[in-house]
Image: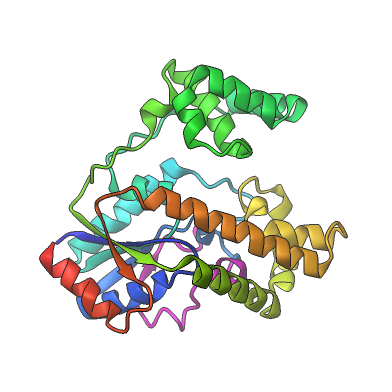
Amino acid sequence: MPVIAVVGPTAGCKSGLALALARRLDGEIVNADAMQLYRGMDIGTAKLSLEERQGIPHHQLDVLDVRQEASVAAYQREARLDVAGIRARGHRPILVGGSGLYVRAALDRLEIPPTDPVVRGRLQDELAQGGIEVMFARLLRADPLAAQAIQPNNDRRVVRALEVIELTGRPFSASLPTREYDVPTITIGLLVPRPELDERIATRVHRMWGAGLLDEVGRLEVAGLREGRTAAKAIGYSQALAHLDGVLTAEQAVEETITTTRRLARRQESWFRPDARIHWLAYDDPRLTDRALDVVGSG
């Protein structure tokens, strides 16, 4: 009984399809959205409410405090335990999310390199002193392949790559996942035309702000949001904090959230599209669930 994975860009209707498949296949859902791991980060991550989950068990939601740093290694361990538990209960595991590395960590043969807080702390100090351009240039010299795979302004991943190189003596690129499933898996990707996706993202962001994202961020700030290296940088949350600080107007915060989310969607498309194992379906196909079931049946 293969795992089913539903992937694609943000705002691409993945949750709806996952719910439909879970109802039809007696499934349980495992989240693969890194920001939905956090308790209280609900509106800004489009996390399904308990009512919207329709009684279907969901795993890897609300497992981290906002002050904790999300870890691919910890997620891999826990998500794989969830998948094994679901299969042991005779149910179908359905993994859903757009965080590409988390999807790969759960499903593919991937060994997570070690970490060392002392080494990482020193590298973060060097980042603060020298800036991301200096650190990225160092990575480019040490591991050109890794540098090509990492956004030049992604300070967290640049530091992580340099940490792995220092700890293992091997290129960080050697630890990048290969496209080989660890367990039998059928992956379905949802295609959304670019203009429609851009419009859906804008609509979603406006809806989030209208639904009380600022109030949610205010509550999370009291709970330590600003102390969280991962949570505080989440799209929507960082812009809301900037608005609360008076750095951005409400309109600027909304527009920056829309622009940044669209960039994220482009990166997600670039991550998933080269993977020949993914079966792509149109997100708005009126027979989407049936077509997805056909893919599962033929797998």
Examine the rendered structure and indicate whether residue 289 appears above or below residue 99: below
Residue 288 within the magenta-colored segment of the rendering? no
The outermost residue toward the left is: 298
Residue for point 43% across, 19% down: 168
For the stretch drawn in magenta, the main secondary structure is loop
Residue for point 24% across, 52% down: 277
Where residue 75 appears, as percent x and y from the top left, is: 42, 48
Examine the rendered structure and indicate whether residue 35 appears above or below residue 104: below
Q: Quarter of the image containing the N terminus?
A: bottom left
Residue 152 seen from this side? yes
Q: Quarter of the image containing the C terminus?
A: bottom left
- Which quadrant of the view contains residue 289? bottom left
Front residue of this view, candidates 69 and 250: 250
Residue for point 46% across, 84% down: 51
Is 156 left or right of 126, judged from the image as shown? left
Examine the rendered structure and indicate whether residue 295 appears above or below residue 119: below
